[in-house]
Image: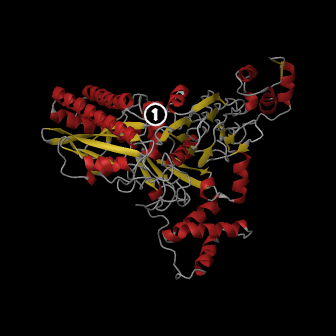
Amino acid sequence: MRTDPVLLEIFRNRFKAAAEEMASVTLRTGFTVFVKETSDFGACIVAPNGETFAAPTDTAVSLMIGLPGHEAINALSDYKPGDIGITNDPELTRGLSTHLPDIWLWKPIFSQGEIIAFGFNFIHSSDVGGKVPGSISPTNTELFQEGLRIPPMKLFREGELDRELLNLILLNCRIPHQNWGDIKAQVASLAMAERRILEIVDRYGHDTVVAGIADILDHGESRARAHIADMPDGRYEFADYMEGDVAGGRPIRINLALTVSGSDMHLDFTGTDPQVQAALNLPTWNQHGHYMLSFGFLNYFRTMEPEIPYNSGLVRPLRMTIPRGSLLNPEPHAAVGVRAATMFRILDVINGCLTQALPEIFPAASSGAVSMILVSTLDVETGERLVSVAQPLSGGSGARPMMDGIDGASFTGGWLRNIPNEMLEADMPVLVEEYGYRPHSAGAGRWRGGSAIRFRMKTFAPETIMTARGLERFTFRPYGLRGGNPGQLGRGVLNPGTPGERNVGKIDVLRLDPGDVVMFESASGGGYGNPLEREPELVLADIAADFINAAQALEDYGVVVRDGHVDEEATIAERAGRSVSEGPFFDGGPERAAHEERWPGWLQAEMAAVVLGYPAALRPWLQRKIVDRLNGGTVVQAGGVAGLAAEAVASLRVGTPSPVPAAAATR
């Protein structure tokens, strides 16, 4: 390491301060509610090789570590001072942008005629065109339905705006004025990055800063390796599910085998289901340490060492194996709009592996989703369509080994801020009737899971459209740990408590009349430890806070409450008749148990491998044929799925394609 340790710590703080200031500029100057209130944007500063060496932790999303910045950087050439690149395309950036609403900008920072860094940022646009307001529909089946694709291009050349490119972008969205406002906020943020980095160069010298950037990344790697080396070596496996309602109804399995060896980690997602004809695919392009696969590890590193250098050095020890054509590494043109829902489930899967290695550290599963509820209506005076995010709907976090879960905020997407009801009501003709904790929803355990959220909204305008993405945990519960109960399922209801009440479940596009009320209840966090070991006074406090009711206290905790007080003798007697054993390490609830009895893990993994072995054009059809046969009563032993696939393919009149050795192929 070339940089003095004291100076390196100064650089760590100076670089991070610059990134925080970048983010604060976007927050203060952004136009859309999703940027200025929810904070769905990011900012960072990257080295010339594309690795992030500084990112904020206090403002914006915490997803800038491990981004493949080199893909955007190398897509353009002949950089000059004042140039700014723009893109939103997941394919041409090979997983930098992961869906079209994320508009990325980047700017070279020159010192002595040399690029020493790039400022990078993105905003999540509330609309980039596509078939629905807000651009994202879970039932999209291909990327072309999801909005305008912007290849890597220069929006500014030596400080001059390319107005023709800008006009093309703004012409293809429903909110051009707001999008241009957000992009200008990004430009201001990049200017701040350039200013602050050059101030550091002026203070410490060109060569010293260049060496410091490289050394701060190396330091991040060394700290990550130290934490990995503290874990027991071994292979840890876990699987969980996307619920798949919008992709034919069959649950979509995400499988991970995590191998810890010394200071290295290998994440093998073999056994994960093939990509789906829905917008749940996550285009990682098998980039090692990809930011949407690695943030669970970053959470762990920062928990154990809050002042760890927060940069892409932390993901250097991570290696990935992701079969090409699978949910996490789809073929080109796959729909990807709701990829965040898949990202959140990956966190549950990663935690499921890590808690086997470190059972005294990791929590039970959180609500497992951050669902974006979006409202669109027509301006009665202009006829223009208004689009606004109503709320990023989160849920409770999982209980921790020595503490209850956090109510109403999950570990999965806790960086997203809620939108003040008054702001939404000022922008749109709606009334928020209720926004708070969902009563009686906390997952039972020695330490209870966090309470879920209830959101009720009434609309007053005709031609109102509501869309929602990322609604998950409506079928499979967040898992409890070490005897803790799983969390409660989410649900969606139209006009609750009226004769017209209807369970709408996971909506795609819901058309509302004036006076309609929509209610969403998110999932709660799973519990940790046997509920019979929870202190009765804590159970009583949960009743007072409306997290549970007296019936739940008796059923789940064996606590008898009468007249607002714990009946100690009755409680002792009630608990004496029940088992106080620790219970299952994982408890995903009866729904998951029933599914895996019908579809054991080996069968799901075998089907994924067989299907991925055929040409991409055949895979969706072939998987449906195999599933139909198995649901129809066909019984297979290990190795038998290949025969079912061969029978199905033999019935085709387009030749007889043979399996190709692509099942484990990665990009």
**Quarter-wise, where is residue 646 in the image?**
bottom right
Identify the residue at horizontal 35%, vertical 44% (top origin). Answer: 104
Q: Is residue 626 visible?
A: yes
Q: Is residue 502 left or right of residue 319?
A: right
Give the answer, above or below, for where 442 lies relative to 617.
Answer: above
> Which image quarter holds the N terminus?
top left
Crowding around mark 1 (Cα neighbors within 10 Å: few <14, some 14 to 19, many 20+) is many
Residue for badge 1: 33
The answer to whether one can see residue 154 in this image is: no
Relative placement, left or right, of 48 versus 616 is left
Residue depicted at 43% across the width and 30% down the height: 305
Query: In this view of the protein, which residue sits in the foreground, 386 or 197?
Result: 386
Assign the C terminus to one quadrant of the image: bottom left
Residue 213, given in percent of the width and then of the height, sits at: 26, 37
Residue at image point 56% right, 55% down: 139
**Does residue 463 sit above or below 149 in this rendering?**
above
The residue type indicated by label 1 comes to: Val
Question: Left of 192 or right of it: where is 519?
Answer: right
Tell me: residue 463, above or below residue 551. Answer: below
Which quadrant would residue 531 be assigned to in this image? top right
Question: Tag 1, which secondary structure?
Answer: helix
Residue 567 image point, x, y percent: 84, 19
Horizontal side, residue 68 vs residue 247: left or right: left
The location of residue 399, given as percent across then percent down, is 63, 32
